[in-house]
Image: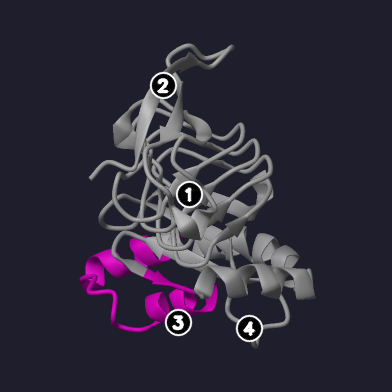
Amino acid sequence: ARKYELTDQHHPSASWLRRIRALVDIPRVGVRAGDLGGWVESEACLAQSGDAWVSGDALVSGDARVSGDARVSGAAWVSGDARVSGDARVSGDAQVSGDAQVSGSADLRQRRHVLTVGPVGSKGRTVTIHRHYDGPESTHWGNLVVAGCWSGTLDALAARIAGEEHGWSADDAYRYRADYEAVIALARPRVAEWAAEPLTAADHARWAVVSA
């Protein structure tokens, strides 16, 4: 069943984007049938299944897709071939673009909360590093790295490329390891910036609702 439709209301400065309207209640999002949402280029941009939703002045354009239980709100913009899934929250003036993959318990509220680098490694992948909520026991913001079908922390990526789990041949290992080492070096200051920001009681309360 479809949970939303495209209205005839076009974005004032991007006419190819149309506002969405809920066709059914979506209790977890606090949306009722008839409520207006954000702006999308086509129905391919927002999954009809799950509780994913786009609200406020948020935009989803191009071949980007929001799915699962993800939310895009505020003045956020998801574009290109980007994917936002899982319980991800993209808000404020955050932008997710290109081939970025944002997932898990991502919490992006500004542009500096996500970093994409590519092509990298043997598969020419785009590596996405974003701010992440690590759970009720955490005291500071964490990070999640997504590279193709692999995901983990930046430290886990460093350990992976240092070992033999990567599957590269001896001839290729030096070149591809250098790729990922450069990504890790670039991401370290950004990850440290997120980790320096303590989680507040309001942050935990907000994520407790997501996990309920």
**Label 1 crowd (10 A; few <14 / some 14-19 / many >=20):** some
Residue at 39%, 75% (x, y): give it: 161
Furthest toward the bottom, the residue is 137
* Magenta residues (range): 151-178
Quadrant in which the N terminus appears: top left
Q: Secondary structure at mark 3?
A: helix
Labels 3 and 4: the sequence-earlier one: 4
Q: Which numbered disc flags the more N-terminal residue, 3 or 1?
A: 1
What is the distance, in whole Å, between disc 2 and disc 4 at their CAs?
A: 39 Å
Q: Which residue is mark 1?
A: 117
> Which residue occupies the foreground of this view, 32 or 57?
32
Question: Which amino acid lies under the numbered mark 2 shown in the image of this protein?
Answer: Thr
Specify which label sits upstream in the sequence, 1 or 4.
1
Q: CA distance from mark 2 to mark 3?
A: 49 Å
Where does label 2 land, which residue?
Answer: 7
Q: Which residue is mark 4?
A: 136
Q: Which residue is mark 3?
A: 159
Q: Amino acid at mark 1?
A: Val
**Residue 66 in sight:** yes
Of pointers 2 and 1, the one earlier in the residue sequence: 2
Q: Quadrant of residue 133?
A: bottom right
Q: Earlier in the sequence, mark 2 or mark 3?
A: 2
Q: CA distance from mark 1 to mark 4?
A: 30 Å
Q: Amino acid at mark 3?
A: Ala
SS for callout 2: strand
> Mark 3–mark 4 contact, CB under 8 Å?
no
Q: Closer to the camera: disc 2 or disc 3?
A: 2
Tag 2–tag 1 contact (CB < 8 Å): no
Q: Residues within 10 Å of mark 3 (few under 14, many from 20)?
A: few
* Label 3 – label 4 distance at C-alpha: 26 Å
Q: Is residue 143 left or right of residue 41?
A: right
Type of amino acid at the residue the image marks with label 4: Pro
